[in-house]
Amino acid sequence: MQHLIGVIRQSGINPVVCINSFYTDTKDEIAIVRKAAEAAGARCAMSSHWADGGDGALELADVVKEACEDKGDFKFLYPNEMKLRERVEKIAKVVYGADGVSWTPDALAKAKKFEADPKYDEYATMMVKTHLSLTHDPTLKGVPKGWSLPIRDILIYSGAKFLCPCAGAISLMPGTSSNPAFRRVDVDVKTGKVTGLF
C-alpha cells in the first residue's frame, strides 16, 4: 500500500485510502492501516458500506470530497508519444519496482510490429498482471527487489484501442466454482426482497 501511495503521489495526486472495515477487523488493525497510509502521505477513511449501506461510507465520502478540493498538479507517467516497450519498461520500474523487463521472442516481435505501425500510436497501454503481487508472481508479497517483469504476449483490443502486455502465467478467463454463489441469489418479484446475498 505504501509503495502504491508513493506511485500515485508521483503523478501529482494526493490519494485516499479506503479501509473496508469488516466485523472481523479489530480497532487495532484498522489503526495500524490508517497510521501506515497517513505516514505515506495519503488521506484515509474507514468504510463499512458492505454492512451499513450509504451510512457506512459517509466518512469516505467526506474524505474524497476534501481530496477533490485540493489543487492538483497531475502529470502522466509517460508521454503519449513513448513507444510501447519504453512504456512497459517505465511501468515495470516505477509502478511495480522491477529492475527491468524481459520479453519472449513472440511478445518482442509483436511489440516491434505495433511500434512500427502508426495506427497503434494512440492506443493505450493496459498491463495484464496478477493483482496479488507487485510482480508477475502472486506468491511474492511486499515490495520485492531484484526481479524482472516477464512479458509473454501482447493482446490487442482495437475497439477500446488497448495494447495489453501480459506478464507471467495469468489466466485471462475468470473461473467459477461448480456451485457459484450467484445461483443462491434471488429476487421476490412481489416484494422486491433480495435473498441469498449473505
Image (tube, grey):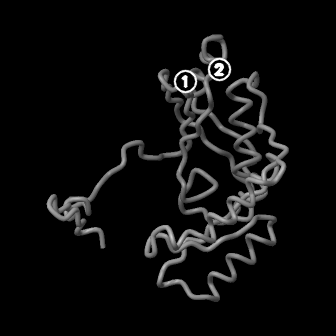
Q: Residue at x 63, y 71 (%)?
A: 59
Q: CA distance from mark 1 to mark 2?
A: 7 Å
Give the answer, above or below, for where 117 lies relative to 68.
Answer: above
> Is residue 157 found left or right of 180 in the rendered image?
right
**Residue 73 image offset from top left, x and y in percent:** 85, 44
- Residue 138 at x, y percent in the picture: 53, 58
Counting residues from the start of the chain, the first of labels 1 and 2 encountered is 2
Residue displayed at 55% across by 46% down: 129
Q: Which residue is mark 2?
A: 122
The N terminus lies in quadrant? bottom right
Q: Secondary structure at mark 1?
A: loop
Query: The residue under label 2 is which amino acid type?
Result: Glu
Q: 95 or 181, which lies in front?
A: 181
Q: In the rendered image, which residue does mark 1 sit on?
A: 161
Which of the image's four quarters has the C terminus? Answer: bottom left
Q: Tell me, for residue 134, which label it has, or none.
A: none
Horizontal and vertical percent position of residue 160: 51, 26
Going by the numbered disc 1, the residue's amino acid type is Lys
Instruction: Describe the element under mark 2 as helix, strand or loop.
Output: loop
Residue 195 x %, y %: 22, 68
Q: Nearer the viewer, residue 192 or 5?
A: 192
